[in-house]
Amino acid sequence: MSVTKLLALLFTLFFSGTIMAECPKILDYQMNNLEGHEVDLCQFSGKVILAVNTASKCGFTPQFEALEELHQEYKNRGFTVIGFPANDFGGQEPGSNEEIKEFCELNYGVKFPMMEKSSVKRHSANPFFEQLIESTGVAPKWNFYKYLISRDGMEVFSYSSITTPSSKKLIRKIESLLEKDT
């Protein structure tokens, strides 16, 4: 491709709005997924994100099913759920990344992105969760805490473990954020 054609293509992409904006600070992290592959969280820029710390042996574990339903329901509108397994609360995520992946897929049909097991507790959390805690002033108090992040990463809302993925309050907020800037 000639330099002229390349410049014309870049000019067209830039002015048609298809070039992604700069990655929001809150997503400017790389983490490994359950398979051990590096994931640049910037790839989720422009999406409404529900980040959830998960555990396979918790009373809230059945929320996996509703989280997957939520993910499927809204993914075509620019929404994703991202799971962050953690063994911080009650030792309820003792498995390896491979065991967590198998458990989630076989028992709940989880297809949304799942990062590798890490800490989500204040002061020992992975950098992404430290940023969520800093943004909201709320640290997870148990498994299945939820953080809802706006498309531009400028708004972050926290929801306790008892707020189910099918909660009307959560659904209304997701829909409100999805309607912004579309």
Image (cartoon, rainbow, N blue to C red):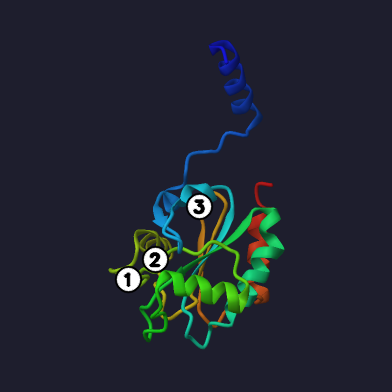
* Amino acid type of the residue tagged 1 in the rendering: Arg
Q: What residue is pinned by disc 1?
A: 122
Q: Residues within 10 Å of mark 2 (few under 14, many from 20)?
A: many
Residue 165 visible to the viewer:
no
Residue extending furthest toward the left: 123
Determine the secondary structure under disc 1: loop
Going from N to C along the chain, the mark reached first, 3 or 2, is 2
Going from N to C along the chain, the mark reached first, 1 or 2, is 1
Identify the residue at image location x=66%, y=76%. Answer: 166
Tell which of 1 and 167 is nearer to you: 1
Pointer 1 and pointer 2: residues touching (CB < 8 Å)? yes
Residue 113 visible to the viewer:
yes
Determine the secondary structure under disc 3: loop
Identify the residue at image location x=63%, y=33%. Answer: 17
* Amino acid type of the residue tagged 2 in the rendering: Ile
Left or right placement of residue 67 versus residue 90 in this view = right
Q: Position of residue 156 (x, y in %)?
A: 50, 61
Instruction: Give the numbered dot on residue 42.
Output: none
Res. 121 image quadrant: bottom left
Going from N to C along the chain, the mark reached first, 1 or 3, is 1
Q: Residues within 10 Å of mark 1 (few under 14, many from 20)?
A: some
Q: Position of residue 170 (x, y in %)?
A: 62, 71
Left or right placement of residue 148 versus residue 99 in this view = right
Q: What residue is pinned by disc 3?
A: 153
Pointer 1 and pointer 3: residues touching (CB < 8 Å)? no
Q: Position of residue 2 (x, y in %)?
A: 56, 12
